[in-house]
Image (spheres, rainbow, N blue to C red):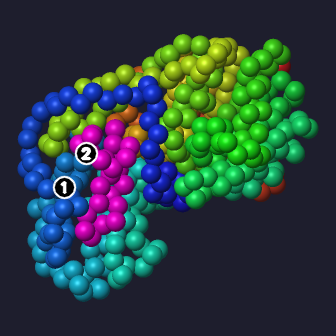
Amino acid sequence: MKTTCHFIYKYIFQIVLGISIISVLVSCRKELPQINQPERYITGNFSEAFEAYWNGMNNNYIFWDIDPTNWDDVYKKYKPLFAQMNINDSTDVRKSYTYFKEMTSKLVDSHYALQITSKYVKDSAKYISPSTLRHSKEPGYHGIIDPNFFYFSIPPKYLDPGYVKGFVNVSDGSQFFAIAGKIKSNILYLHFNSFNLKQVYGSTTTNDAQKTLKYYFDQLKNTVGLKGIIIDVRSNGGGALADLDLLVGNLTDKPYSIGATRSKGGMGRLDYTPWIDAQVHPAKDAKAFTAPIVVLADLNSVSMAEMTTMALKALPTGNATFVGERTWGGNGPLLPNDDVYNGGQFKTGFMNLVYTSTLMLRYKDGKIYEGLGFPPDVEIKYNGAALDTGTDPQLEKAISLIPQ
């Protein structure tokens, strides 16, 4: 999944305050209750490796009630195939990669990915990302927008003199960068490549990325003369859920709901907790911003980039417009790998990581956009040829939607 949340295998440990989970066991039906945690299974052969993985998915996967995959049929078809293979044979190990790719091809979780642990599988083939494979076959598919376009091309062409930008290495080993400035002296623009906002903004070490965020948030303290805001999360792979209250919470003076989340409440495939309200909370001293807000997002906007787009669209002021493309479709929050939620990511003796959402998100309109992506109000398709010349049709449309 490129450098996006659906393929980066980045652990997301911060939890947005508004998304709380009540551990209530709702037993819809009991199916093959788990005796061991997946990582505790003995995996000396392929039969055991398959059992560990199948049971881990049976109990941990959050989307079984909306997923088209018949997990029982998967067991019936693939259990005998794995039983015939030798886990110490390089050809069979590579064959298992093909089987795992087939088994997971229709899973709706667009964060979902497998990381196989084996010396017999090349590094380029250790990861299986069903959503990436599906998207790559769709008409109009494109990779992420080159980060250099945001950092070097947009500022001198579209932003007024005095814009700020900067980058910094963050604790997960990645590089965070941000650009902020004015357009036509009265439109505030912000782009950043990942959701490490709270970490960078609150850093005790001053850096240019932090100065960029400080510039943006300082502008929100006095919005006199400001005609609108453009928040650009195109090709943003997601990150910390805690950033939602920081970014969107600075645009509202009261808490509001963006939808609801639920988790697994027990070991059964359909054992869910009740839906729990998911809220954005206002930042300290924040004021409601009532001028137009345009959020830019594209096919490669994933996870927190999608949730932020949804949250902006859900603002009580109703002043946000989404311009761009339908997003990736991976918006189920991910939480640490522990026993609290009875679900989410896990590992086995044969797999270093099964990366899957912990919670299911239902938007305020009652729809679940997992595997589908969130649709734009104004669709402007990716135009690689225009970007190569330094022109940004999506940004230009966003600018045109803010009256002067």
Residue 395 appearing in the image: no
Q: Position of residue 160 (x, y in %)?
A: 88, 35
Residue 141 magenta-drawn?
Answer: no
Question: Relative to 58, is 318 on the left or the right?
Answer: right
Q: Position of residue 231 (x, y in %)?
A: 67, 33
* Position of 269 relative to 41 (above/below): above
**What secondary structure is the stretch in magenta mostly built from?**
loop
* Position of 50 relative to 237 (above/below): below
Task: Residue 220: name its quadrant.
Answer: top right
* Separation of residues labelled 1 and 2 (CA atoms): 9 Å
- The residue under label 2 is which amino acid type? Asp
Q: Position of residue 350 (x, y in %)?
A: 27, 70
* Residues at circles 1 and 2 in contact by the CB criterion of under 8 Å: yes
Q: Position of residue 70 (x, y in %)?
A: 19, 51
Identify the residue shown where x is 87% and y is 27%.
185
* Sooner in the amino-acid sequence: mark 1 or mark 2: 1
Residue 343 magenta-drawn?
Answer: yes
The extreme right residue here reads 161
Residue extent of the magenta highlight? 335-359
**Of 372 and 195, the residue lying toward us:** 195
* Position of 182 relative to 236 (above/below): above
Identify the residue shown where x is 61% and y is 30%.
247
* Number of residues whose C-alpha sits closer than 10 Å to that of mark 1, classed few (under 14), some (14–19) or many (20 or more): some
Circle on res. 37? 1
Quarter of the figure with the C terminus: top right
Task: Residue 197: name its quadrant.
Answer: top right
Circle on res. 339? 2
